[in-house]
Amino acid sequence: MTDGKVLSVNVGVARPNPAKRNGGLTGIDKLPVEHAVEVRAPGPKTTGLHSGVVGDPIGDIKHHGGNDQAVYAYSREDYEWWEESLGRSLPDGMFGENMTTVGMDLNQTQIGEVWRVGEVLELQPTFGRIPCSTFQAKMGEKQWLKRFAREARTGTYLRVITPGPLQVGDPISVVHRPARSIGVSEAFDIYMHRSEELARLLVAEALPADLRAEIDRRL
């Protein structure tokens, strides 16, 4: 059964980061491509290949990329919600996602479920996108970080379970749902705003190890 499909595949262009006083580059500016791209597990965040999408640059390798943030997905449905709220057009790739989906409610996506994308590629949601100053600069909206966090329409980061090609039109099927988990949007909202419920996140076995360690410290 198909749960959705890939509407757009977006690959970044390295540009100077206006949010960084000391310079540096960012790969948040992503443009749709028509050809298939290869997706693989990039390895550790600071020492690996950084992005899971071949040819996609990442500037801040301390906070972005690595196995648990190999691919970022955002839905066209949530873009449409934001377009109405902001009164402006938001093209695919605007939020810096590698994959724009349609037909899937990413807010209800469960941490640890497995997606088959196309015939080979398998991806696993890990957590929502925590907004940063680079995202604020890209959007140019007042108090964008607080607004994005408040709405919890975060999209989802994904790790690569089985490498393979990714291209526009690929069907997306959820082929595994974990027995114990929590939705990406709810997990993000707890992490950001409801610290008294943090222990609930530890139920998700596929939660990234560094995030699990942080939550253990906070508890």
Image (spheres, rainbow, N blue to C red):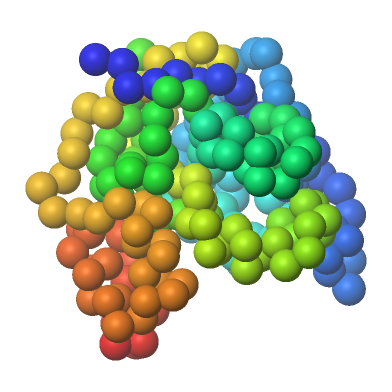
Q: In the drawing, does residue 116 fall left or right of residue 158?
A: left
Most foreground residue, 63 or 141? 141
**Looking at the image, which residue is at 49% across and 45% down?**
155
Q: In the drawing, does residue 169 fall left or right of residue 191?
A: right
In the picture, which quadrant includes the N terminus? top left
Q: In the drawing, does residue 38 fall left or right of residue 107?
A: right
Q: Residue 188 appears in which quarter of the rendering?
A: bottom left
Q: Is residue 20 above or below residue 206?
A: below
Q: Residue 60, can we see it?
A: yes
Q: Residue furthest left?
A: 179
Q: Residue 98, can we see it?
A: no
Q: Residue 197 appears in which quarter of the rendering?
A: bottom left
**Looking at the image, which residue is at 48% across and 56% down?**
152
Return the x and y of residue 150 as percentages of the image width and height.
53, 64
Return the x and y of residue 191 as percentages of the image width and height.
40, 71
**Looking at the image, which residue is at 31% across and 16% down?**
2
**Looking at the image, which residue is at 47% across and 35% down?**
40
Return the x and y of residue 195 as percentages of the image width and height.
36, 81
Q: Is residue 86 above or below residue 204?
A: above
Most foreground residue, 3 or 166? 3
Q: Please state the total of marks drawn on the protein image.
A: 0
Q: Residue 196 appears in which quarter of the rendering?
A: bottom left
In the picture, which quadrant includes the C terminus? bottom left
Most foreground residue, 214 or 40? 214
